[in-house]
Amino acid sequence: MSNEQDKKQQVHQKKMQALKENIDASIAAATIDRGVGILLTGNGKGKSSSAFGMVMRALGYDYKVGVVQFIKGQQLSGEEIYVREKCPSVTFHQMNTGFTWDTQDRSSDIVAAKTSWAIAEKMLKDDSYHLVVLDELTYMISFDYLDEDSILSALKNRPKNQSVVVTGRGGGSALTEWADTVSEIKEIKHAYNEGVMARKGVDL
């Protein structure tokens, strides 16, 4: 090894050692053992995909998982097909009305939302669920289909070791305040805006 290479290695090793010490210190400082609330929001692609990634993680440990999808349901998606056919242990429910701009029927959408929320609420009271995903729930609040206070109460009073993932654009300050982790996915570019059709296995 040349002197120049040796110097680069020493600099690199010093940087990595400092990084390791910071990471180790952060891990050691995290001593609270409880479920977490996660809000995945923003106008970018990937919120539901991220949530289903956590579903796969939980299943890897044989944890019990519940999923309630609001808004979606009329068009099959890859996650629905996979979970229904390959993951019978997952409790999976869809509001099954499609997008609200498709139905254009506020009254029936509210009824469907309340029916779906009743199922979600039971999961949020059941400590056998390690993870509950409430996909696109934020729309139910922004469209005023469901009572925000009731949702927040259920989220806050869930079993201590249960984690919950809420997805959807917006969601409001109250959900942000409730969540332990908030990630905003920002759209930079989207193929759909260039006329590219949604792809099975990627978008659907």
Image (cartoon, grey):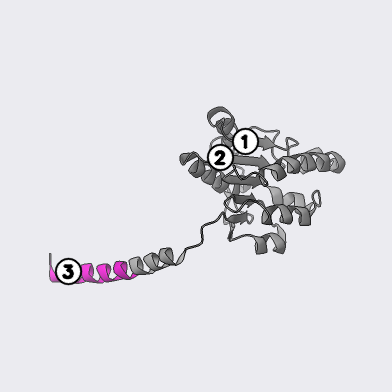
Query: Which residue is at a point 57% across and 57% down the rendered structure image?
Result: 188
| Residue type, numbered disc 2 | Lys
Query: On the rendered image, what quadrant is the C terminus found in?
Result: top right
Q: Indicate the position of residue 185 as horizontal and vertical percent values.
A: 58, 56
Residue tagged by mark 2? Answer: 64
Q: Decide: few, some or many residues near mark 3? Use Cα within 10 Å; few <14, some 14-19, many ≥20.
A: few
Q: Is residue 114 left or right of residue 53?
A: right
Q: Amino acid at mark 1?
A: Thr
The extreme right residue here reads 107
Percent position (x, y) of residue 35?
56, 54
Q: Is residue 187 visible?
A: no
Which one is nearer the viewer's eye here, 95 or 158?
158
Q: Earlier in the sequence, mark 2 or mark 3?
A: 3
Q: How many marks?
A: 3
Q: Check disc 1 and report its element: helix, strand or loop.
A: strand
- Tell me which segment is drawn in magenta: 2-18
Q: Amino acid at mark 3?
A: Asp
> Is residue 123 on the magenta stretch?
no
Q: Secondary structure at mark 2?
A: loop
- Mark 1 = which residue? 91
Q: Mark 2, residues whose alpha carbon is within 10 Å: few (<14), some, or many (≥20)?
A: some
Residue ID for mark 3: 6
Secondary-structure class at tag 3: helix
Q: Alpha-carbon distance for marks 1 and 2?
A: 8 Å
Give the Cα separation between the discs numbered 2 and 3: 51 Å
CA gap, disc 1 and disc 3: 56 Å
Q: Are marks 1 and 2 in contact (CB under 8 Å)?
A: yes
Tell me the residue at 62%/48% (across/down).
Answer: 193
